[in-house]
Amino acid sequence: MTRPAPEPVPPPGRTSLAPLFAVCVGYFMVILDVTIINVAVPVVGRDLSASLTAMQWITDGYTLVFAGFLMTAGALGDRSGSRRVFCWGVVVFTAASAGCAAAPDVPVLVAARLVEGFGAALVVPGSLALLQEAYPEPAARSRAFGLWGSMAGAAASAGPLLGGLLVSAAGWRWVFLVNLPVGAACLLLTLRHVAPSPRDPARALDWPAQCAVVVAVALLTGALNEAGRRGWTDPAVLAGTGLAAVAAAAFAVRERLARSPVLPPRLLRSRPLSGGTAIGLLFNFGFYGMVFTASLYFQHQRGYTALEAGAALFPAVAMTMFASALSGRLARRTGDRPLVAGGMLLAAAGLAGWSLAGADPPYALLVAPLMAAGFGTSFALTGTTTTVMGAAPQAHAGAASALFNTARQIGSAVGVALGGSLLASAAGYGAGLRTGMAVGAAAYLAAAVLAWRCVPPGPARTAVAAGPTRAPEET
């Protein structure tokens, strides 16, 4: 088969932004779907006569599959080429969105949401690997990772606002229909501007290990989601957590025995990779726990509409783009360690300030904490992402990205579950919210300590590729 001609390399100093734009469009789309559905679910329930359990599956089914298949998708990207798997994910996600929009009843909608979650899992690990390939120069890569990271906070926080606008103006089906032109544009941009990725067709996929990690992450995410509703001592929650631990242990044993493990043990012993992954879990715990509890607080305690609650969270969203751009520029001068640690300290101060603001403070007093949490999280995400990806050789870039994003997804699930439990406690919304903010501040402080110990003091460098020589991806 004829191999594609290599794409022209931009002259020095003229790094193209087209690959960055293509990848970030796809990443924004799949992260947006985690939160945009929350506003639409009550309307879907009335329109399709859905039960409460069915409405929970419409929301959580996507998250379960998304989290569960991230590691598998990362391994597929390393084997088949990150661009190929990324494009598969965009196609699956877009087609499933069309199925969601056309669903005549709840079972079809739930099934389409599960497929949509699988498409999202294929997109996310490849997005980071593609950026690492497209921007090998450290400064350009740092800026690219910064914008990529800001997409997550912006998408998650903008979901309720955009969802409220679409449901109010055009109906709940447009929450899914909006993905069709975005997905088509992302696919065309990726095929046109993102170079084919290296691949390793000889690398075996360890299916027992992949199945074990899918089961472990899906069970853990499901148990954490249910903990917010049922309580942490509910038998179903305890059983799910216990079975997830068993599956995780089976994965660890299999990885030690496998000839071709998902991530070699020497990489997992790397302080930058393992520490950066733990930092990602902690700051997602703090940020998404804050977004979830604040959204419920604004709507249930203060009587805001979904649209007003989304607008109230906007200060956190507005800071993410500015913080990521600034972090990417400063990293060239200071290295990543002070930026990650400083961002975590600023976010901790923001949530601690909210916790100390009183039972029902004026909204004006909450603007600064929201801005500090959004700015600090996005400011630290750039350096954390660079640290994790810089510690992984190119042959394992997809798996490292998947590990990082799986940890972040678990952190989000824990933050949301704990926040829901605290709000539902007998102490009431006000006390539960303040306790949740204090716990989030503690998580940010722990992340700051980890950053000082695990993030390299200078700018991270991409690890040298290891393993067998990889052939260019065929197109």
Image: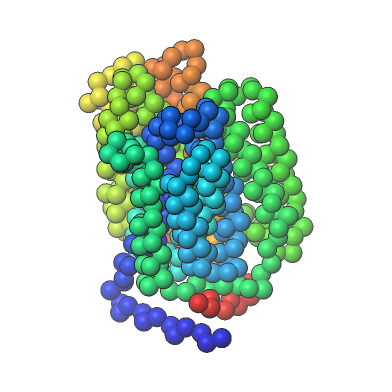
Instruction: From the viewer's perspective, tell me whether residue 256 is left or right of residue 408.
Output: right
Instruction: From the viewer's perspective, tell me whether residue 249 is left or right of residue 57.
Output: right
In this view of the protein, which residue sits in the foreground, 177 or 400? Answer: 177
Q: How many marks?
A: 0
x and y percentages locating residue 170 in the rendered image = 30, 41
Asked which quadrant contains residue 15, the reply is: bottom left
Please say if 226 is above or below 123.
above
x and y percentages locating residue 169 in the rendered image = 27, 39
Judged from this view, the residue extending furthest toward the top is: 426
Instruction: From the viewer's perspective, tell me whether residue 436 is left or right of residue 375.
Output: right
Q: If the image is split into quadrants, where does the N terminus sit?
A: bottom right
Which residue: 47% across, 60% down?
Answer: 91
| Residue 277 visible in this rendered orientation of the protein | no
Judged from this view, the residue extending furthest toward the bottom is: 2
Judged from this view, the residue extending furthest toward the right is: 257
x and y percentages locating residue 182 in the rendered image = 36, 56
Which residue: 48% across, 67% down?
Answer: 83
Please say if 263 is above or below 153.
below
Which residue: 57% across, 33% down?
Answer: 224
Judged from this view, the residue extending furthest toward the left is: 364
In this view of the protein, which residue sits in the foreground, 153 or 64? Answer: 64
Which residue: 27% across, 49% down?
Answer: 322
Q: How is the image coloured?
A: rainbow
x and y percentages locating residue 292 in the rendered image = 42, 32
Asked which quadrant contains residue 317, the reply is: top left
| Residue 108 visible in this rendered orientation of the protein | yes
In this view of the protein, which residue sits in the foreground, 238 or 92? Answer: 92
